[in-house]
Amino acid sequence: MHEYSLVSALLDRVEKEARARHALAVHRVTVRIGSLAGVEPDLLRSAFSLVREGTVCGAAELDVEPVEARWACGGCERPIAAGEVLRCPECDLPARLLSGDEIVLGRIEMEVP
Amino acid sequence: MCDTCGCGDPEVVSVDVHDKILAGNDRTAGHNREHLAAKGVLAVNLMGSPGSGKTAVLEATARAFAGKELLGAIAGDLETDRDAERLRAAGIPAAAITTGSACHLDAEMVHRALHRFPWEDLHYLFVENVGNLVCPAVYDLGQSASVVALSVTEGEDKPLKYPVMFRKADLVLLTKVDLLPHLDVSLAAVRDALARVMPRPALLEVSARTGQGIDRWVAWLRHRRVEMPLGVAVAAHHRRAEV
């Protein structure tokens, strides 16, 4: 249940941005979470709805944009499907993760004076 | 103010950030890593399920090094400091981090522990993470090597169920292999599962009880330490001051 500590780091970051712009309120926070990030979107949402109380995000919605894991050969860049052996059958090189480990704050929608 | 008509009402703006949520943890981890590397200390983040044999492997590691090189440990535990006590009894100076309800260690906890633990003269620092195959994988601590202990009794498909943890591992220690004659566990199936989640699968079969494979684990550690890039402590300090 590290989702609570993630949300607390997220709220700190959002508050910093909101303060810098003298925001009156935050309406929406968009995060991108990779399928290999080790974060459960549902747990993240429920943690957010609890921890946001009393912060500038008190009425904010959390949008979670999922990012699929994509692997490719580190040499020839041929795609390697998730679940396959992570080694290129042609080059015999290890696969490289192109996307899917993101834990990223994307956008903040905020009300500014 | 609303730019469209100048009415003075608040407006809603969308601000693009595109920043890692754990950027703060990553900065502290980088700081830990540079300090440790600058002193030539190989820091190992040892992860695994509760009961996978993390502490037993470290006890066997201390026996194998037999005092020739200096080992130290930081042990994360939910409620007790029993693991740290076991390590001290085995001759490894150890500090405990009692995490309470936190299911993982983070870089700041390790940083604080390093402030009250004499680590500068060590050759190896083992950070025994909280027993958990999910959360510890998310937090960089500043280690130079990530090692996962997987016991033979946990099932061949464990890597497929917890791909996040195994993807980031530099080495998997298959522990308790002395139990294999009593189990229907296929090593080939374990290796196949690892190859589907670890781009560079590395597995050592060990038994803390019989000592099997511990020599190869110690050789692996020595090799990693020789290969470790040296950091610059001064640069690490400057970056931390800016945070």
Image (tube, rainbow, N blue to C red):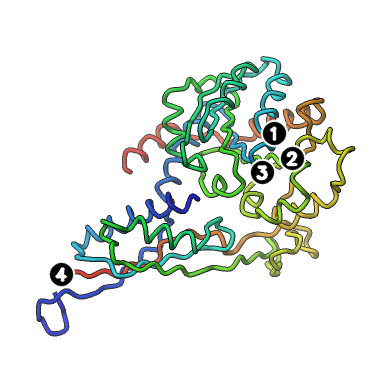
Q: Which amino acid does label 4 sit on?
A: Pro
Q: Which residue is denoted by mark 1 in the rendering?
A: B53
As rendered, which of B194 and A63 lies closer to the eye?
A: A63
Residue at mark 4: chain: A
Residue at mark 1: chain: B
State how far apart marks 4 and 1 are (Cα): 57 Å
State how far apart marks 4 and 3 are (Cα): 50 Å
Q: Which amino acid does label 2 sit on?
A: Ser
Callout 2–callout 3 Cβ contact below 8 Å: no
Callout 1–callout 2 Cβ contact below 8 Å: yes
Q: Which residue is denoted by mark 4 in the rendering?
A: A113
Residue B7 image-quadrant placement = bottom left
Q: How many marks?
A: 4
Give left or right: position of B160 versus A12. Answer: right
State how far apart marks 2 and 3 are (Cα): 17 Å
Q: Which residue is denoted by mark 2 in the rendering?
A: B151
Query: Residue B170 — which label?
Result: 3
Query: Residue B128 — which label?
Result: none
Q: Which residue is drawn at 58% across and 49% down?
A: B134
- Mark 3 or mark 1: which is in front? 1
Residue B96 drawn above or below residue B177: above
Give left or right: position of B37 versus B163. Answer: left
How many neighbours does mark 3 have within 10 angstroms: few (below 14), some (14-19), or many (20 or more)?
some
How many neighbours does mark 1 have within 10 angstroms: few (below 14), some (14-19), or many (20 or more)?
many
Q: In which quarter of the image is the C terminus of chain B?
A: top left
Residue B19 image-quadrant placement = bottom left
How many neighbours does mark 4 have within 10 angstroms: few (below 14), some (14-19), or many (20 or more)?
some
Give SS at disc 2: strand
Q: Residue at x 36, y 66 (%)?
A: A29
Give left or right: position of B211 versus B11. Answer: right
